[in-house]
Amino acid sequence: MGNHNEFGRLGEQIAADYLAKQGYHIKERNYRYLKAEIDIVALKGDDLAIIEVKSRSTNFIAHIADTVTEKKKKLLVMAADHYVVHHNLDVSVRFDIITIFKEQGKFKLEHLEDAFYHF
């Protein structure tokens, strides 16, 4: 496995640990539906958070929300809809982005709630 894949998995683990400490219940990791993959599905109260994790080795990137393409957004919405219907959930759904930055051997996490859609 390439270093970027290992770093991506580490970033997802850091994000999951953070969410658990914030009171979220991790329902799924790497949930797949057709061509879509949701990094983390987490529940907090009546809110289902669909979370895209972006891991970066530097903080020199575009705005966090701009790192997720329109195609990726559509795939996430499709997968989230399938998840909610398949599990017969009565929840509000929001789409978050968590970015993990690695700089000088330390990790910095940024959590952007309701990053691009809300329904």
Image: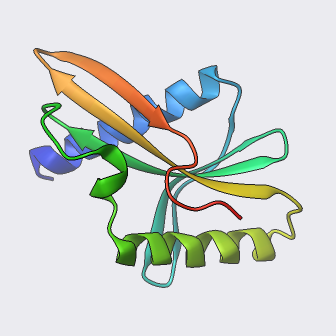
Q: x and y percent of residue 107 in the render?
A: 27, 20
- Going 32% across and 45% down the picture, which residue do you hit? 64
Image quadrant containing the C terminus: bottom right
Q: Quadrant of residue 101?
A: top left
Name the side, left or right, on which 53 lies relative to 63: right
Which residue sits furthest bottom? 34
Above or below: residue 82 compared with residue 47: below
- Going 49% across and 84% down the picture, which residue do you hit? 34
Q: x and y percent of residue 70 in the render?
A: 37, 74
Above or below: residue 43 compared with residue 52: above
- Going 89% across and 62% down the picture, which residue do you hit? 90
Name the side, left or right, on which 88 lies relative to 70: right
> Which of the two residues, 52 or 59, is positioned nearer the viewer here?
59
Q: x and y percent of residue 47 in the render?
A: 77, 47
Above or below: residue 23 compared with residue 73: above
Q: Quadrant of residue 20?
A: top right
Q: x and y percent of residue 77 in the render?
A: 57, 72
Q: How many marks?
A: 0
Above or below: residue 94 compared with residue 10: below
Is the image coloured rainbow, by chain, by secondary structure, or in one colour?
rainbow
- Going 50% across and 50% down the picture, which residue do you hit? 115
> Which of the two residues, 67 or 85, is positioned nearer the viewer here?
67
Q: Quadrant of residue 79?
A: bottom right
> Which of the two residues, 89 or 67, is positioned nearer the viewer here?
67
